[in-house]
Image (cartoon, rainbow, N blue to C red):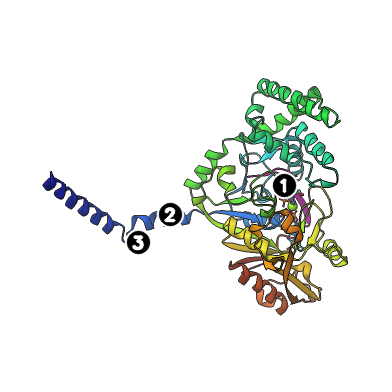
Amino acid sequence: MSKHYATLCVILNEVRDLSRMRVPNKLGDSSLIAQNDKKEMDIPVSVVIGTQWGDEGKGKIVDLLAEKSDYVVRFHGGNNAGHTVVVNNKKYPLHLIPSGVLHPKTNCVIANGVVIDLEVLVSEIKMLQNDGVKLNGRLFISERCHLILPYHKALDLAFENARGKDKLGTTARGIGPCYADKVSYNGIRIYELKDWELFVEKFTFQAKIKNEILKTFNVKAINVKEELAKISEFRKIVLPFVSDTFLLLQNAIDQKRTILLEGAHGVMLDIDFSPYPFSTGSNVITGAVNTGAGIPIQKISKVLGVVKAYTSRVGGGPLPTELTDSLGESIREKGQEFGTTTGRPRRVGWLDLEAVKFACQVSGATEIAITKIDILSGLEKIKVCAGYKLNGKFIPYSSCGYQELAKLTPVYKEFSGWKEDITNIKSFNDLPKNCQDYIKFIESFLGISIKLISTGPKREEYIKL
Ligand code: GDP
Ligand code: IMO
Ligand code: MG
């Protein structure tokens, strides 16, 4: 027995040595692993993530990058997002269709993690088609997407009104109630929409229950017949775009096509990592690419964190660096900080790098795009929050709930401003020295390379580094 065991050990050791020879420690070209790694690296799947409270300028950045992308994919959220693209002096506010749509060769995917309001989708499709944008054969919508139905919007409003002075300030687009139905198995998807009888049955059942709930809020019930008539029309326009987006994207990965995933909102609104309940209904972080589009995270080669040069937030919830004075008012006016979706004035404040650092960590940002730096031109002094203090002690963003965030004191670093208009500058070295210092500080604080500086809303207004 022991002799056989010894022989077996020798054979096993030889096999191990052989396999070590095939895959040396220091990875060389001959290494199988190295070759596989290289193959992985060649597949350009990148993600754009908002690192603040939304409205960082993701739409502008995605449009810029989309020119070289085969696919641009929305993977979470719904029409609470408002992404602005400005091309040839025309402003396109996009809520559901990916911001790559204005590049005629780029395919646009609304993947399974997105929640869809058919009325908004149809009006966006029509708006683009009326403007000569062709969508046939390049817009793909997952049948796994859950539908935002009229009762979701009514419930969103009813809950907000019931909260009174403690309202959250949602976009009232039905996002929370729709995701709530999804996870409580009460959702209805595009899948059901394909089979009209099945849809009518499910919708009628859900609407009956939701109408009972609406009654308790003293809110008008949904008229099932009228709503079904509208949906049956929307359905005809949307269904031709429905397909298996999982398969589409897997094939794209196999064929080494470039895929750009367009994040919505901002990490500070992530359902898990925000100071809940001042949140949105979806995960905003990079991990949502896997659940929301079926793309494994190992395939992602780049995560671009979008950082607005100052802070804005729409709706309620703490905002540690908020400027409630006339300076805040003037930044809001100059930056045109009014909601793309709801038109509400956005609250503004100094750049909060403590929060942005957290957002970059949790989303694995590999590079940064700075936006709206032009809006800071003309300020005498510019402040940046470089840490939080609570009761005299430093506290990281991750340890704060909404009560701590409302109480803490931001620790600021102050910079001298610059007077020049920087909109048309094309090289970093041509930026005013104080502007360069501000940008360099952001880069060194985050420890992540800045690859893009946006200097205006138009497509061509940027500096590449
Ligand atoms: P998103 O939700 O992150 O896509 O951002 P929004 O589109 O809601 O808000 C950003 C606003 O700033 C839009 O009106 C953009 O056109 C505009 N914008 C984007 N980048 C810049 C920039 O670098 N400078 C200026 N002045 N405006 C910008
Ligand atoms: P983009 O993609 C800014 C905010 C709302 C509200 C909270 C919850 O344009 O950056 P919801 O309707 O999602 O249930 O509202 O989240 N919010 C956004 N704020 N930009 C967004 O998207 C937002 N999406 C949600 O204002 O405070
Ligand atoms: Mg927006």
Considering only order in the chain, which callout, 1 or 2, is on the residue closer to the N terminus?
Answer: 2
Q: Secondary structure at mark 1?
A: loop
Disc number for residue 277: 1
Residue flagged by tag 1: what amino acid is it? Pro
- Within the magenta stretch, is there residue 90? yes
Q: Residue at x 83, y 32 (%)?
A: 217
Estimate the spatial distance between the alpha carbons at disc 2 and disc 1, rounded to whole Å.
42 Å
In front of the other: 4 or 139: 4
In the image, is residue 457 above or below residue 172?
A: below
Q: CA distance from mark 3 to mark 1?
A: 51 Å
Q: Position of residue 139 (x, y in %)?
A: 64, 41
Is residue 54 among the parts visible in the rendering? no
Residue found at the far front of this picture: 391
Q: Is 323 left or right of 400, judged from the image as shown?
A: right
User: Relative to 390, is 3 above or below?
Assistant: above
Q: Which mark is residue 29?
A: 3
| Element carrying mark 2 | helix
Tell me the number on the disc at residue 39. 2
Q: Does the image show residue 5?
A: yes
Q: Residues within 10 Å of mark 1 (few under 14, many from 20)?
A: some
What range is drawn magenta here? 76-96
Furthest toward the left, the residue is 3
Residue 245 percent coordinates (x, y)? 57, 39
Mark 2 C-beta closer than 8 Å to ligand 1: no
- Image quadrant, ligand 1: bottom right
Give the x, y percent position of residue 442. 66, 70
Pick whichever of labels 3 and 1 is earlier in the sequence: 3
Image quarter hosting the C terminus: bottom right
